[in-house]
Image (cartoon, rainbow, N blue to C red):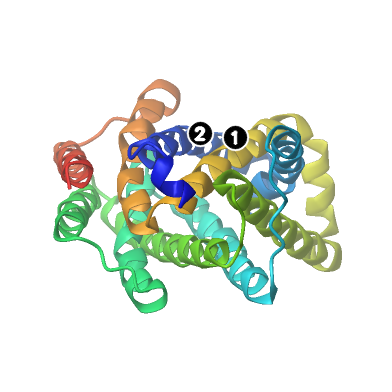
Amino acid sequence: MFLALLPPWLWAAFTVIAAGAQTARNAMQRDLVGSVGTQGATYVRFLFGLPFALLFLGAQRLLIDAPLPVPDLRSVGWAAIGALMQVLATAFMLIAMRDRSFVVTIAFTKTEPIIIALLSIAILGEVPSLMTIAAIVVATAGVLLMSLPAKAQGAERPGVKAALIGLASGACFGFSATGYRVSMVGLESTSFILTATVTMVMGLVIQCAAILCWLALRDRPLLVTIAKNWRPSLFAGFMGALATQFWFLAFAISNPTRVRTLALVEVPFAQIVSRKIFKQRMSAAEIGGMGLIVAGVVLLLNG
């Protein structure tokens, strides 16, 4: 099988690149909340990401000597599940960011490997190794440590609220990743790159169609506001498409449980962004939690 010819570390490289691009996209979306609102910031990554995804697919079609995979109804159905759960997960994430710091909100969403592991066993029959399970346990413990409520007066209740919303976001991301992985498994192609990109485009088309229909029927002023803020939204869309491209490349050649566990490196990336852009500091518990997350990643890569 052609996947056997790929370097064994390739999925990890794809994942780290995706995590970096996603951190930049999340920061841009967070900044857009003030101008287009939470819903608008949720939608821009999809609406402005689709054109870039189509450009990626067009370039790959010219460079790769392989036919485009044709999705069947099962692949389309699972892609739709992945696409709609991804929109919901992004919305939850941005809502949580209003009550808690950027880096801690990202940490909340990273409980998804547990959901993905369970779904992978139930749907794909892919049982994670003992080392992968250990990595998930250690890294998730780090996430829980980071989610401890702040000691500052009045900060505890918002922290709990943000934790619950962030956990909901992580669960939705877990369902999304599994849906996309099942969709890819159903595509027949000699190129894992085309498999990944066709799935990405399929998901974005579904997402954009649903979003545009919703806005046209329920909130046309928001659609106008998004259009007026096209310049900053364009960057968020590009980074969103770039991140999704590399997430899907990793999903196409590796178990999503491993991919999303390694994706916890996004938490240190988010910490860098928080310190440089949002001027947010971490507590001792958050630093300790991040250490456990890194330890979990080390276990995963050595498993």
Q: Which mark is residue 78?
A: none
Whether tag 1 and tag 2 are in contact, CB under 8 A, the answer is yes
Q: Is residue 258 left or right of residue 33?
A: left
Q: Which residue is mark 1?
A: 239
Give, as a three-letter code, the residue at label 2: Ala
Q: Is residue 41 visible?
A: no
Give, as a three-letter code, the residue at label 1: Met
Residue 204 location (% of width, % of height) = 69, 54
Residue 82 location (% of width, % of height) = 56, 65
Q: Is residue 272 visible?
A: yes
Residue 149 location (% of width, % of height) = 23, 53
- The numbered mark, 1 or 2, whose residue comes first in the sequence reads 2
Residue 227 location (% of width, % of height) = 82, 42
Q: Which mark is residue 21?
A: 2
Helix, strand or loop under label 1: helix
Circle 1 packing at 10 Å, graded few (<14), some (14-19), many (20+), is many
